[in-house]
Amino acid sequence: MFYDIPQGSVLEPLLFAQERTLLRHLIHSQNLDHHVYVDDTQVYASLSTANTDLSLTQLDDCFSDISDWMTTISRKLIANKTDLSIIDTS
């Protein structure tokens, strides 16, 4: 789908924007929210005690889909830099 291009090419920002748009669509298809930074994406979901298992499954499915998608565009999700944080507000 995507091919390596020389660094500094005028196509670089366009391809980067296209990749980020596809990533946003993938995350939204899982009914999750996210923040995108230049070199980082944060995916998050609000959990309640009634649906914790469902939401964690959603997050797991989303990370799996992102990893599969990244493989198709010759990118790699770095597993040891992928974190799951649960914040309790009680």
Image: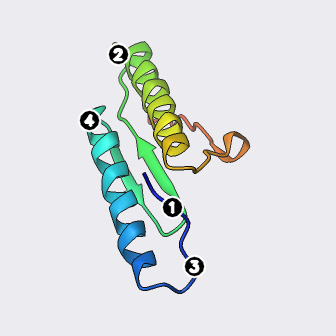
Kind of residue sitting beneath label 2? Asn
Label 2 vs label 4, nearer the camera: 4
Q: Name the residue under label 3.
A: 6
In the displayed structure image, the side of residue 11 where residue 74 appears, left or right: right
* Local crowd size for mark 2, using a 10 Å CA cut-off: few (<14), some (14–19), many (≥20): few
Q: Residue 17's x, y, as percent?
A: 35, 68
Q: Residue 9's x, y, as percent?
A: 48, 84
Instruction: Name above or below for residue 41 compared with residue 68.
Output: below
Kind of residue sitting beneath label 3? Pro
Label 1 vs label 2, nearer the camera: 1
Kind of residue sitting beneath label 4? Ser
Q: Mark 4 points at which residue?
A: 29
Q: Distance between the residues labelled 2 and 4?
A: 19 Å
Q: How far apart are marks 3 and 4 (CA)?
A: 32 Å
Q: Considering only order in the chain, which callout, 3 or 2, is on the residue closer to the N terminus?
A: 3
Residue shown at the point (33%, 62%) measured from the top left: 18
- SS label for mark 1: loop
State if disc 3 and disc 1 touch (CB < 8 Å): no
Q: Residue 22's x, y, as percent?
A: 33, 51
Label 2 vs label 3, nearer the camera: 3
Q: Mark 1 points at which residue?
A: 3
State if disc 3 and disc 2 touch (CB < 8 Å): no
Q: Considering only order in the chain, which callout, 2 or 1, is on the residue closer to the N terminus?
A: 1
Q: Mark 2 points at which residue?
A: 51
Q: Which colour scheme is used?
A: rainbow
Q: Considering only order in the chain, which callout, 4 or 2, is on the residue closer to the N terminus?
A: 4
